[in-house]
Image (cartoon, rainbow, N blue to C red):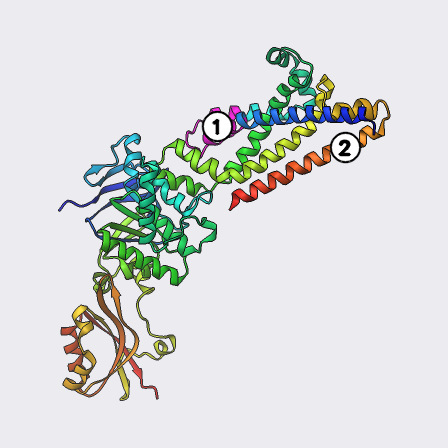
């Protein structure tokens, strides 16, 4: 493997990591409140706003229904508005995040739903405020599940970031398509696949370890 | 003395189903009251009303003189901090250590970290879990979890402790130790305790007064001894008491005759003894006074609350049996002739 190719793979890996980490971080920061909103405004929730819960659910489902490759194109004007350009690694973070937020929100909502309602009742009966219940019961108790959800989102973002190559985002997927597929360079193709396998495996191992540790 | 808890004409329904119908009772400071009823009797609804999680549609609930039914939600959040609740399934946070769980009500009431540590140590000592601070609930047995649950319920110095089927998920050994712990807490701290349960055995051992709930109505209010004495028991009471009363074993019950057919049949009676009767040398008195031989078939002397009480089935044999029966009527709480059984070798 020539130093040139090695350099290409290294730079692409860096670009992929940048897109994946940034979009996952945004997905978690905005997706978790969204999940809490959907759960607590639901029929058994702490705030009970059934109409708002249903509306938000519909928006989330609609976003998740659009295939990511279409979403990328559809979102170009919004991307241009937020990032100033629709091309490049930084710009790709916008559509990746917009796809990631509802994705993580649904997974987080499931994890939060698994929390024993008896615990919510117990803390309510103790005179805990709704804020205390959300922080000390819902989030704290769902933490292992939330971490697992984060791992899944992270890995999904690795896959999605490859597609972002279509709008010139760079990254490993882009490299594999341009050098491996279009120029028949099998070395690059295998190199990229190897890096992706290692990246995903490491993410899964780290996620599992953290979730298990949090389970006590 | 004004009662610590005063329930006046509470009625609550869910849609068409009336869960509670005109319930009234009061609990004095330091009292241990057992609230018993079958599933669906309205226990859970009443409990949710008592701990201010549910607002009854009619009636008043006065806790320490304050009417909970008219207070705004903001105030109820404060009131709940003064009511300790112990749950059937413990409801401990798995994400927190034992100390963290006990600290939760302290955090809620705005206690600083510095004040929390000594209080937690003191509570763990009280419930017999010294040195368990750093353990997680998943590392504890059922009985230990419930001890943590009790420590947590006591943390914020409640005026009232509500126990919701606190021993129903525990094995007999842990049940005994948890009930003893609750009795200790009642004695040491003078804390008022309301036990909600479907098991007569639990209230027998420990409640000073028993309330019986059936189909949303309060059908009985009294001590267990009162209940045992009443001959015309309600159907609910009869089923509840059946669990703890001695009964003739099946093979003897089939031999039981209503009249004395022939000589050699022994008179079988059920006796209920109060505190004095339980301490008295009753059987030897019967022999000395009437030359009547006594045999114990079932039952014996047990504790009800803080008192001894006898509930037993015995047979009498002798020429002066009738006189002995008259005598027993005067010295026992109640005496009931069940019939006659043939003598066994």
Residue corresponding to mark 1: A37
What residue is shown at x 65% (from left), y 11% (from top)?
A85
Q: Specify the quadrant that holds the C terminus of chain B.
A: bottom left
Q: Quadrant of residue A65?
A: top right
* Residue neighbourhood size for the residue with mark 2, other residues' Cα within 10 Å, grouped as few (<14), some (14–19), many (≥20): some
Q: Quadrant of residue B324?
A: bottom left
Q: For residue A46: magenta?
A: yes
Relative to B157, is A66 above or below? above
Which chain does the numbered disc 2 sit on? A
Give the percent coordinates (x, y) of residue B13. 33, 40
Q: Earlier in the sequence, mark 2 or mark 1?
A: 1
- Res A193 label: 2
Give the percent coordinates (x, y) of residue A25. 57, 27
Relative to B28, is B179 above or below? below
Residue bounds of the magenta highlight: A31-56
Q: Residue lying farthest front?
A: A3
Q: Nearer the viewer, mark 2 or mark 1?
A: 2
Relative to A192, is B94 above or below? below
- Res A45 label: none
Instruction: Label 2: state its secondary structure.
Output: helix
What residue is shown at x 14% (from left), y 85% (from top)?
B289
A86 vs B326, nearest the viewer: A86
B186 vs B89, nearest the viewer: B186
Query: Is residue B41 shown left or right of residue A183?
Result: left
Query: Is residue B233 shown left or right of residue A107?
Result: left
Instruction: Label 1: state its secondary structure.
Output: helix
Q: Is residue B22 visible?
A: yes
Q: For residue A32: magenta?
A: yes
Q: Quadrant of residue A123?
A: top left
3D distance between C-alphas at marks 2 and 1: 38 Å
């Amino acid at each position: 493997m020539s130093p040139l190719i090695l350099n290409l793979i290294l730079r692409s890996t860096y670009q992929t990591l940048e897109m994946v980490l940034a979009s996952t971080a945004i997905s978690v920061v905005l997706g978790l409140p969204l999940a809490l909103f959907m759960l607590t405004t639901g029929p058994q929730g702490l705030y009970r706003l059934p109409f708002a819960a249903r509306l938000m659910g519909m928006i989330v489902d609609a976003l998740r229904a659009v295939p990511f490759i279409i979403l990328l194109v559809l979102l170009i004007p919004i991307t241009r508005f937020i990032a100033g350009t629709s091309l490049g690694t930084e710009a790709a973070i916008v559509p990746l995040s917009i796809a990631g937020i509802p994705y993580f929100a649904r997974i987080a909502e499931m994890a939060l739903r698994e929390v024993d309602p008896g615990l919510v009742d117990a803390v309510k009966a103790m005179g805990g405020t709704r804020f205390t219940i959300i922080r000390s019961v819902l989030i704290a108790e769902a933490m292992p599940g939330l971490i697992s959800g984060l791992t899944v989102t992270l890995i999904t973002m690795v896959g999605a970031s490859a597609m972002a190559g279509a709008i010139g985002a760079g990254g490993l997927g882009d490299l594999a398509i341009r050098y491996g597929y279009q120029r028949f360079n099998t070395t690059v193709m295998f190199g990229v696949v190897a890096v992706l396998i290692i990246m995903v495996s490491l993410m899964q191992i780290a996620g599992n370890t953290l979730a298990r540790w949090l389970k006590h | 003395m004004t009662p610590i808890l005063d329930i006046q004409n509470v009625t609550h329904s869910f849609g068409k189903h009336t869960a509670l119908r005109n319930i009234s009772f009061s609990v004095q400071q330091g009292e241990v009251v057992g609230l018993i009823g079958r599933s669906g009797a309205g226990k859970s609804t009443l409990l949710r009303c008592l701990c201010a999680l549910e607002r009854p549609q009619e009636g008043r609930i006065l806790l320490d003189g304050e009417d909970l039914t008219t207070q705004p939600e903001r105030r109820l959040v404060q009131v709940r901090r003064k009511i300790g609740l112990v749950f059937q399934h413990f409801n401990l946070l798995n994400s927190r250590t034992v100390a963290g769980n006990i600290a939760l009500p302290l955090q809620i009431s705005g206690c600083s970290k510095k004040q929390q540590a000594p209080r937690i140590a003191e509570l763990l000592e009280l419930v017999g879990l010294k040195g368990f601070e750093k353990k997680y609930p998943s590392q504890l047995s059922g009985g230990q979890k419930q001890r943590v649950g009790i420590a947590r319920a006591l943390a914020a110095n409640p005026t009232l402790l509500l126990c919701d089927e606190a021993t129903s998920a525990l094995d007999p050994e842990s049940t005994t130790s948890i009930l003893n712990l609750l009795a200790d807490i009642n004695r040491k701290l003078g804390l008022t305790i309301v036990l909600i349960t479907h098991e007569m055995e639990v209230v027998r051992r420990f409640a000073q007064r028993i309330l019986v709930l059936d189909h949303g109505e309060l059908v009985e209010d009294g001590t267990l001894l009162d209940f045992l004495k009443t001959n015309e028991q309600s159907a609910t009471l009869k089923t509840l008491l059946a669990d703890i009363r001695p009964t003739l074993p099946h093979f003897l019950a089939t031999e039981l005759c209503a009249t004395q057919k022939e000589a050699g049949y022994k008179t079988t009676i059920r006796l209920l003894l109060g505190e004095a009767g339980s301490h008295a040398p009753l059987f030897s008195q019967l022999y000395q006074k009437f030359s009547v031989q006594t045999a114990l078939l079932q039952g014996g002397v047990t504790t009800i609350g803080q008192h001894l009480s006898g509930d037993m089935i015995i047979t009498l044999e002798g020429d002066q049996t009738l006189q002995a029966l008259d005598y027993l009527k005067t010295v026992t709480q109640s005496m009931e002739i069940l019939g006659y059984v043939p003598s066994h070798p």
